[in-house]
Each structure stands twice: as structure tokens, then as C-alpha cells.
């Protein structure tokens, strides 16, 4: 059997996420993000399409680099307003049985003692369908909002994140034994005291003495997602991540990135296949090529490449409103605010604002595949095989039709080719991804603590 | 029409909450707290009974005062393990249309910038059915778990809480104007930049510069619950709270407490009726008196008065395992760990361990009313009229039957007497409680900021 494609839907608790401007399309319903029904309908849709997971991004600051202002951010609703992602999960979990959830939480924003309980609670309520996308934050506006004088130095953020993970593993994996809870009504023992112990963590960033407040959940540690792009971020991902996202422009660049990640994972003492690698993509699908082209043309009329520029400006720290069309963007990356790891690709490819605007035809920078079921399946297969990746993070265009179109047009072709499951595997999110049970295995650092 | 009784169900995301030991009853299902279905069933049950709200308690530490140990706490599952309460809400909201939710969150545990977004998200998703029970924490074990060297001094915790509220009101009430979001597809304006502004808060405890991340929700500020018992805590409640809980042993003591609260609210410049006062009660109801007595006797066989002692030990800082039966408990309150405000009632009433154990016949200290519909309605009516209170926080015994019994046996009698609604009012949680619309009104400090 050929390798099965992993598939996440990519979304965010906001209106404009990746493909900016499409909120203005007459059929788009993303402004309904404030309603529970919007999310429970989405979850049911994704389960109909046998998606492995719904991945929910998050950001704690605002995009104020472009034109040194939030005006365009507000007018085009570029990830602002943005609501809390964790709060959505229990309603969607109640509406589904198999869909996994990967939720972004910034390590700097939550005390790990409480973050541990929050994810344990979600792992209980979803019966092992929760994942965590670990981010350390990159926006000065978020740091100021959280009362810090400015963003802490990049590498020290990852040092803190490493210590945070160690502390979380202690809480999740070591405070309660598997057989601690017995619920023995006759002997009047809910939990056996000798099977439960406080952790004592005294480190550089955290001091925690206490019992994990939650009893053991199915996965204990949630499925760990991380998408480091800097050398230090990649080292963090190599050590901790079970799934990672890469932004690749074509299968060849995906292959280079994929090989580098698997080598780093191996260098960290883990198996190269202990990490799943997903590429972010946009798909415009229709039963016919002519229909797909017409749909793409229709979407383009509403997309906002300028909003895409503003998003990229925040991600790179470079105000792209000030650049002319043909100067390589990377030439402006020598100011102190530039985020070097996020402009590496721009540097490598000599990206200019003109070329970027062409890529932003749908308002977002992800590779866009426009076609019918056969041609899209061909391209996805090429990405998987030549790019040496495991699957895709499918972003949305016009909601909900872009997910419905993918399910109705593309999934059946992938299934015919044996590239996509025809039913969910049993078990937890982790077991569906890796097939080795609910818990992390050695040599992952969470497992070696046990 | 006589005054309508307000009714909250009182619960917690754990097994043993108030009436300890009843988890061992063969029909009790509270161990299912880890399943979504347990909570969505509960929410539907409460909505069937036209409950105004479900109030969810929380605690961030463990009870380790009794016998200087957590052993009994684990064996009798005395609020340990305890899962996150906020995470439950969206699933229950999706299963209901009218039920309100009052959720406990400790101010010290969450950064207000993120707490503000979390409650705004819940207010959006529930369409204005969210409330917040503000607590400042009283457990050293929680402080140690959160990396503090010990609990901060009591009054300074409330100073911090006052500043936190000011900061939250700025985010909730002032960052976005009501008409900021226009969703104008033609003009391509989701939000009007001139109607949105960052807050700039620089205080003793917090420094926050930033935009509220959420657009305005129905209530903006969630319905505010607080239950201060110390003089400083009562002053906080008088300034901020819209609902408060009192622990009263009889209607006369409720009346004294109620009058003191309304006077404090008036002294804070608000109307005496701007606060709703609820008393915590336990009810064992049956269609017949004999049936109720038999049910009570059955429950008592499983209740754990000792677990109730352990809970009270944590609440007072006094290890009751060391006391003899007849020495007044308040005599032991001169140790440095004693929580004076929580033993005031014990001091006033000359409470001994023997008398306490009698009150703990169902494992909890709330007044217990055992009877049929008529006798229970009589007692509740007496509490309301003589106690000058607004309603009740109904705690559970054996789950779910204690809520079902109350709904089937007591509610119809209250309705016949005109003391309880026969349908939900329209609108938000706040509007159902106060009838003046969705938002806080002046002179509440949240309203005067606008």
C-alpha cells in the first residue's frame, strides 16, 4: 500500500487567516467565527472528509509593521480580531468522534502548571484527540501587551521553552502512575496515595512544587506540533516535535527541508520517522478544469494581495509598503527589527515585492493548486513523493465551500489511488498518526522521564 | 407577583465537590466528569429545570492541612483530581440555549490580557451567557505550584485584584466601540480603524499596552460573581460583584449577612439591588416525606464526614485531625496559618468538632433540606423572605439524581406558588438576572469607564 497522506485543516479563531481578503466574497462565512455552530459544522465537515486533524493557529499581538499601523489589519481583518482557540475544542469534540485537534498556545503566555491541566482536561474530554502547537511568539506587540518591556532574546525564548517542556513532561508523565485511580467504592479509595506524587522542579525559568491536578489522560502528553524555522527553533523541534510544518514553494524545496529535519531528529537521538512533516497548501478544486479556473478567477477578485503583504511584513519585521517593486526584499533585512529566519527564503530566492504580489494572488503565500480531482491528486502525490513529506495543512479560501470542494472533488481520487484512508483508524490522535499506541515512546524525552 | 427565586446549580470539574464521600454511592456518576457527555447531559438537565446558571468552582492547589497530608484528599477525591472549568463551557453551550455559566478563575493564575480574551471568546460563543467568579486564591500549595515562594499577603492580593479589574474593564469596555465592526464587503471594511484603540495601563501590578484582541461581545464584561468573606474581600465584592454567595446556617444569619452586603454595595455608590445574593444549600427531595427520609439515610451511609473535616481544615488552615471533639475550633485559630475570615462563623457559634461532624452528615457544610415538594418549598420561601436573599446555589449529592429530583419534585411547587419562572426570559445572562439589558450600567465601575 502506498504511503497514506496525512491531512489537517488549517484554521484560526478569526476572520482573515492566510488567504486574505476573501472575507469579502459574498459566499464566505468566516465572519461567523463567533458562533458555535460555525465551528461544530466545520468539525463535522472535516470528519466527513476523514481529516486527521483541525489545526488552529493563534497570535497574541497585532500586525503593525506595514505602514507602521494597524489600519489595514483592522480593515482587512488580518488575524484581528482573534479569539481564544482552546475554548473552541470541547464543542467540536462533542460534535465528532475521530477528528483530532492541534491547538496553538504560546509558552510565554501561560503558566505551565495551569497549561498542563488545561491540556490534560482536553485530552480527557476528547478521549485522546488533542495536540498542542508549541509557539514562543515573535511579536513585540504581544510582549508589550503582556507587560514585558519587549520581546526577550530569541534563543533565550527557546531555552525557556525547553525548560517548560521538561516541567510539563514531569507533570503529565510522572505525577500520577497509570494505576493510581482505582475508583474502589467498597474500600473507599478513589486514588491510591502511594501512586501519586508531587513534582519538584527548580530551574532557571520555573519553580514548581506540586501535584499535577489532573489524573492521567489517554495520551498524557498531547501530540506535539512545532514549526521552528530558525536554527534554534529547528533544534527545539528536533527534540520535541511529533509533527512539524514547513513552508515550501515546490517539492524540491520541501525535500531539502524534510531531509534537514529528519537528520536533525536523528541527531537528537530519535528515529527519522518519529516526526511527521506537513506542508501548508491552498487548493481550489472543481469537478472540471474550466470550473476550477473560473472559481480561481472569482476568488481573485476578492482576495487582497496587499493584506498578504501586511501579514508578511509582520512576519519579517520589514515594512513592505516602503519598498519598490523590484528591489530584493532581503536587502531591507539589515534593520534591527527584521526576523532573519523568516526572510531566509526571500534571500535564497531573490524575492521582490513584485514576485511576492504574484504569489499573493489569493491573498496568502502558500502554494496554490488549482484543478480538478485528477490534476490536484497528481500534484499532491508529487509533493509527497518528491518532497518526501507526510501530508498537508490545507488552508481555507472561501468558507465553508473550500473544505467541501476538497472533500467532494479531491478525496475520492486520492482514495481510489490508495493514497488516503477510507475510514478512521481506532484510538487516539497519536495512535492514528503513528500506530504505536496512545503514549509517547522512548527515545522521546517525555517517555524517558517515566 | 412575588419575588422570583434565582437558582444556580453548583458543581466543579472533579468528583468530590461539597458533599464528600457520595462518589462511593452505587448510583453516583460523578467519576464521569472526564467525559463530555456527562457535562452536556447535565447542562440539558439544568435547562429542563429552567436553572439560571451552572456555577463551576475551581481550586489550583491541593488540600494538605488535615493530617498534614494529601492521603485522605486522594482516597476520598476531595477536589483532587480537578480539571479546568473553562474548557467545559463551549460543549455545554452548544447543548443548550438559555443556561448561564459562572466559571471560577483565579486572578493570580492568568495574565489579564489573555483572560480578557478568553472571557470575550466565551461571551461570543455563548451569545452572552458567561459569568466569571473572581477568586484570589487562599492555598499555599497553589502559590508554590505557580512558582511563588508562598501566598502573597491577603490584602495585597485584593489590591492586585482591584487593579486587575480596572485593566480588564479597559480591555472589555473601551478598546473597541460598539460600531467598530461593520463587515462592509463593498467598501472592504471589516472594522473601522478610527473606532478601535489600544489601552495603555501602567499600574503597580500590571503594565499592558495593546488592543483588546476580541471584538465587542454581547455582554462585554461577563457577569461578575465574587464571594469575599474578609473585610477586604467584602469591599472588593461591594465594588465589583453582581452576584455573591454567602454561607449561612439559617435565615437569620443570612439576613444579617445580606443586609451587611447591601449596605456595603450602597456605600460603594451602587444600588443595594445591584447585587444578587445566593445561599449555598443541599436538598434531598422526594415525592413523599418517608421517601425523602429514606433517601437521606441511604446517602448518609456513603457520605464521609471526615472528608468534610479535611476540606474544612484546608479552608481554615487548622488541622482538625488534632482536635478533640468538644474544644471550640476557634481556640486553635491562633496559629499563623489560620485563615481568620473563614473561621469567623466558627468563632461566633462556638463550633466544635462534634457539632461540625453532625453538620457534615452528608459530607458537606451547607444547610441540608430534606423533604417533599411542599416542605422544601416552604423552607426555601422562608430563606428568601426572612433571609432577604435572592436565591440559591444548589449543590449536588448523588449525581445526576439530585438535580433531577429537585427539578421533578421542588420546581413544580415553586412554580405553582409563583416563586419560580415557567420559561426563560430572553436575552443575555445579565439581562435574565437584572432585566436592564446586556451591559453593566453606571454606577458600576465598568460602565463609568465607557
Image (cartoon, coloured by chain):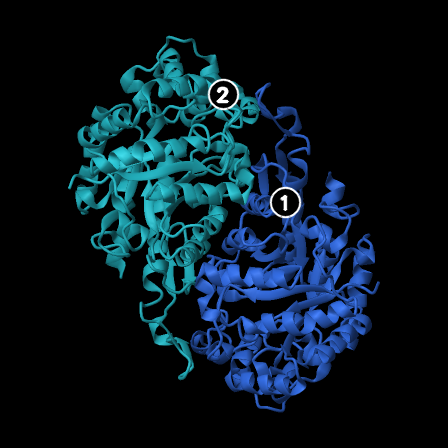
Chain colours: A blue, B cyan
Image position of A217 (left or right of B450): right
> Residue drawn 44% across and 63% down?
A34
* Residue A165 in the image, given as x and y percentages of width and height: 65, 48
* Residue A393 in the image, given as x and y percentages of width and height: 66, 67
Nearest to the observer: residue B70 or residue A29: A29
Q: Which chain does the residue under circle 1 lie in?
A: A
> Residue drawn 59% across and 70% down?
A403
> Residue drawn 52% across and 79% down?
A307
Image quarter for residue A229?
bottom right
Q: Which chain does the residue under circle 2 lie in?
A: B
Farthest-out residue, front: B287
Total labels drawn? 2
Q: Secondary structure at mark 1?
A: helix
- Residue A424 seen: yes
Farthest-out residue, left: B1
Q: B360 above or below B146?
A: above
Q: Quadrant of the N terminus of chain B?
A: top left
Image quarter for residue A296?
bottom right
Image position of B56 (left or right of A214): left
Q: CA distance from mark 2 to mark 1?
A: 28 Å
Q: Which residue is mark 2?
A: B66
Q: A160 above or below A197?
A: below
Contact between labelled residues 1 and 2, with CB atoms less than 8 Å apart: no
Q: B306 above or below A422?
A: above
Q: B162 above or below B313?
A: below
Give the number of the disc on residue A375.
Answer: none
Give a yes or no on whether discs 2 and 1 share a subunit. Answer: no
Q: Secondary structure at mark 2?
A: helix
* Residue A372 in the image, given as x and y percentages of width and height: 68, 80
> Residue drawn 58% across and 73% down?
A402
Q: Quadrant of the C terminus of chain B?
A: bottom left
Q: Which residue is mark 1?
A: A168
Amino acid at each position: 500500500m502506498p504511503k497514506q497522506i496525512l491531512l489537517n485543516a488549517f484554521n484560526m479563531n478569526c476572520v482573515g487567516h492566510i488567504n486574505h481578503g476573501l472575507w469579502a466574497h459574498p459566499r464566505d462565512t468566516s465572519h461567523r467565527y463567533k458562533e458555535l455552530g460555525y465551528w461544530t459544522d466545520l468539525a463535522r465537515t472535516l470528519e466527513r472528509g476523514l481529516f486527521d486533524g483541525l489545526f488552529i493557529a493563534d497570535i497574541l499581538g497585532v500586525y503593525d509593521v506595514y505602514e507602521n499601523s494597524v489600519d489595514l489589519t483592522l480593515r482587512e481583518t488580518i488575524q484581528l480580531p482573534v479569539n481564544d482557540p482552546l475554548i473552541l475544542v470541547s464543542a467540536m469534540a462533542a460534535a465528532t468522534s475521530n477528528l483530532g485537534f492541534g491547538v496553538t498556545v504560546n509558552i510565554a503566555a501561560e503558566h505551565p502548571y495551569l497549561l498542563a491541566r488545561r491540556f490534560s482536561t482536553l485530552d480527557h474530554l476528547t478521549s485522546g484527540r488533542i495536540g498542542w502547537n508549541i509557539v514562543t511568539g515573535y511579536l513585540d506587540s504581544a510582549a508589550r501587551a503582556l507587560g514585558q518591556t519587549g520581546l526577550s532574546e530569541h534563543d533565550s525564548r527557546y531555552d525557556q521553552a525547553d525548560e517548560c517542556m521538561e516541567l510539563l513532561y514531569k507533570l503529565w508523565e510522572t505525577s500520577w502512575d497509570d494505576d493510581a485511580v482505582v475508583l474502589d467504592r467498597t474500600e473507599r479509595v478513589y486514588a491510591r496515595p502511594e501512586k501519586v506524587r508531587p513534582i519538584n522542579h527548580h530551574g532557571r525559568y520555573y519553580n514548581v512544587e506540586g501535584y499535577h491536578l489532573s489524573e492521567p489522560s489517554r495520551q498524557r502528553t498531547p501530540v506535539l506540533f512545532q514549526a521552528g524555522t530558525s536554527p534554534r527553533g529547528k533544534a527545539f523541534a528536533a527534540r520535541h516535535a511529533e509533527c512539524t510544518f514547513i513552508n515550501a514553494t515546490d517539492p524540491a524545496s520541501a525535500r531539502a527541508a524534510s531531509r534537514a529535519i529528519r537528520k536533525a531528529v536523528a541527531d537528537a537521538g530519535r528515529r527519522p520517522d518519529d516526526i511527521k512533516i506537513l506542508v501548508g497548501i491552498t487548493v481550489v478544486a472543481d469537478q472540471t478544469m474550466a470550473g476550477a479556473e473560473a472559481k480561481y478567477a472569482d476568488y481573485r477578485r476578492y482576495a487582497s494581495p496587499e493584506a498578504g503583504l501586511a501579514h508578511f511584513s509582520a512576519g519579517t519585521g520589514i515594512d513592505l509598503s516602503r519598498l519598490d517593486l523590484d528591489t530584493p526584499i532581503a536587502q531591507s533585512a539589515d534593520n534591527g527589527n527584521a526576523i532573519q529566519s523568516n526572510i531566509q527564503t526571500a534571500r535564497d530566492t531573490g524575492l521582490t515585492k513584485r514576485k511576492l504580489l504574484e504569489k499573493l494572488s489569493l491573498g496568502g503565500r502558500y502554494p496554490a493548486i488549482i484543478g480538478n480531482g485528477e490534476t490536484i491528486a497528481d500534484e499532491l502525490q508529487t509533493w509527497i513523493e518528491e518532497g518526501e513529506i507526510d501530508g498537508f495543512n490545507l488552508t481555507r479560501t472561501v468558507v465553508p465551500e473550500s473544505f467541501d470542494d476538497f472533500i467532494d472533488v479531491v478525496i475520492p481520487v486520492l482514495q481510489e489511488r490508495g493514497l488516503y484512508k477510507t475510514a478512521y483508524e481506532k484510538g487516539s490522535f497519536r495512535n492514528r498518526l503513528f500506530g504505536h499506541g496512545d503514549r509517547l515512546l522512548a527515545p522521546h524525552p517525555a517517555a524517558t522521564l517515566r
